[in-house]
Image: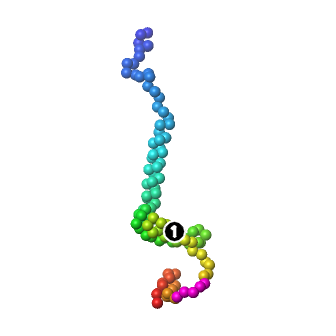
Amino acid sequence: MRFLKRHRRFEKYDEPLEDPIAGVANLFDASIVFIVSMMIALFMAYNMLDMLNPKSEMTITKKTADGKIEVITKKGKEIKVQKVTDKRLSGEGTRLGTAYQLKDGKVVYVPE
């Protein structure tokens, strides 16, 4: 009967159980790294790394799903969004040149 009640010498009985919530912090850190890497990959895929450079100047035209056109202009740290409308304007001014539309749809501007 002595052999049935034998205890192991190296086994610890007072060891606390592992906290099941401890891995959530690691998941949060991993998700932040994943989100930042996806943002950088999207900027590189669309050649928009100049948007992050504070000294760069760029202009982007964008057509929305309903057919409206937006012009996005970035000068330094300032970004402006302008919407193009179909409204006709009138007033006084000087003629700058002539615009021609080619057969393939391109528009060529010829200054006077």
**Foreground of the two, 60 or 107:** 60
> Residue 87: image x %, image y %?
62, 78
Judge left or right: residue 61 versus residue 3. right
Split into 4 quadrants, where in the image is the N terminus? top left
Rate crowding at label 1 as few (under 14), some (14 to 19) or many (20 or more) other CA atoms within 10 Å.
few
Q: Is residue 71 magenta?
A: no
Judge left or right: residue 66 versus residue 62. right
Q: Residue furthest front?
A: 92
Q: Is residue 35 above or below residue 57?
A: above
Q: Residue furthest left?
A: 10
Q: Residue furthest bottom?
A: 112
> Residue 72: image x %, image y %?
51, 69
Q: Is residue 94 visible?
A: yes
Identify which residue is drawn at 46% across, 60% down.
Answer: 42
Residue stretch rendered in magenta on the structure? 90-94
Q: Is residue 111 above or below residue 13?
A: below
> Residue 56: image x %, image y %?
41, 67
Q: Is residue 45 visible?
A: no
Q: Is residue 106 above or below residue 38?
A: below
Identify which residue is drawn at 40% across, 66% down.
Answer: 55
* Most common secondary structure along the magenta stretch: loop
Q: Is residue 51 above or below residue 106?
A: above
Q: Which quadrant of the structure image shows residue 48? A: bottom left
The three-letter amino acid code for the residue at tag 1 is Lys
Q: Please, what secondary structure does the residue beneath circle 1 have?
A: strand
Q: Which residue is mark 1?
A: 80
Judge left or right: residue 7 versus residue 98. left
Q: Which quadrant of the structure image shows residue 66? A: bottom right
